[in-house]
Image (cartoon, helix red, strand yellow):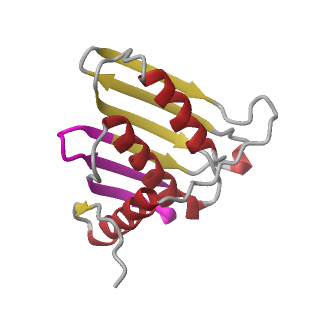
Amino acid sequence: MSYIEWLENSLTDKLQEQPVGEPVALRAYLELSDDHGHLVPTAGAMAAVAGAWFDAGLPKVYALGGADQGYVSVTATYPGGQTALIVAESLSAAAGERPSVRLLLIGNHGTMEFADSPGADFRTVDRTPPAGASSEALSRAIAESLRSGAPVEGRAHSRG
């Protein structure tokens, strides 16, 4: 199981208790890999997780940055009005940085913070972005937004 899948499952279980009411906004900062190729898929996976927490469809995304800049920043606006700000940043292995995740989930009745340093306990952690239809659709939309400099609707991939 990937770290992001673990994160989704763990916090979904907590959200069942409705500690914040209905989730309406997410701020997520993820430093999981020194592989610049993981930035867009990591942001796409986190946007898909946010959509699951919001119980919403695919969002419209606007992205800045890119692999050459070492980060991808995404604003995702979901059909129900919920919003997520997601930043996936590359680790600098040369600087000895450790993976880190910081989330702030805002609901209509409170907030919840989450901070973690995956692998700090020396357990092996799969930090690669998980595959999945929503994650892949949002990764494509984020990549298109980076290319075009404009917001892009997340769409399920249709085979034709």
Q: Position of residue 41 (x, y in %)?
A: 50, 59
Q: Nearer the viewer, residue 58 or 89?
A: 58
Query: In percent of the image, x 26 and y 39: which residue is there?
Result: 83
- Magenta includes 69? yes
Q: Nearer the viewer, residue 160 or 91?
A: 160
Q: Position of residue 32 (x, y in %)?
A: 61, 46
Query: In percent of the image, x 40 and y 49: which residue is there?
Result: 48
Q: Nearer the viewer, residue 60 or 51?
A: 51
Q: How many marks?
A: 0
Left or right, 96 with respect to 51, comes to: right
Left or right, 19 with respect to 119, comes to: left
Left or right, 6 with respect to 15, comes to: right
Question: Is residue 32 positioned above or below 15 on the image?
Answer: below
Query: In percent of the image, x 50 and y 31: which residue is there?
Result: 102
Q: Residue furthest right?
A: 122
Q: Nearer the viewer, residue 149 or 81?
A: 81
Q: Quadrant of the C terminus?
A: bottom left
> Residue 128: in sight, yes or no?
yes
Question: For residue 138, which quarter of the picture?
Answer: bottom left
Question: For residue 20, which quarter of the picture?
Answer: top left
- Magenta includes 92? no
> Residue 70: in sight, yes or no?
no
Query: In percent of the image, x 49 and y 48: which residue is there?
Result: 88
Question: Is residue 155 positioned above or below 61 on the image?
Answer: below
Q: Main secondary structure of the magenta part?
A: strand
Q: Position of residue 91 (x, y in %)?
A: 62, 48
> Which residue range is magenta in the image?
60-84
Q: Position of residue 92 (x, y in %)?
A: 65, 49
Question: For residue 150, which quarter of the picture?
Answer: bottom left
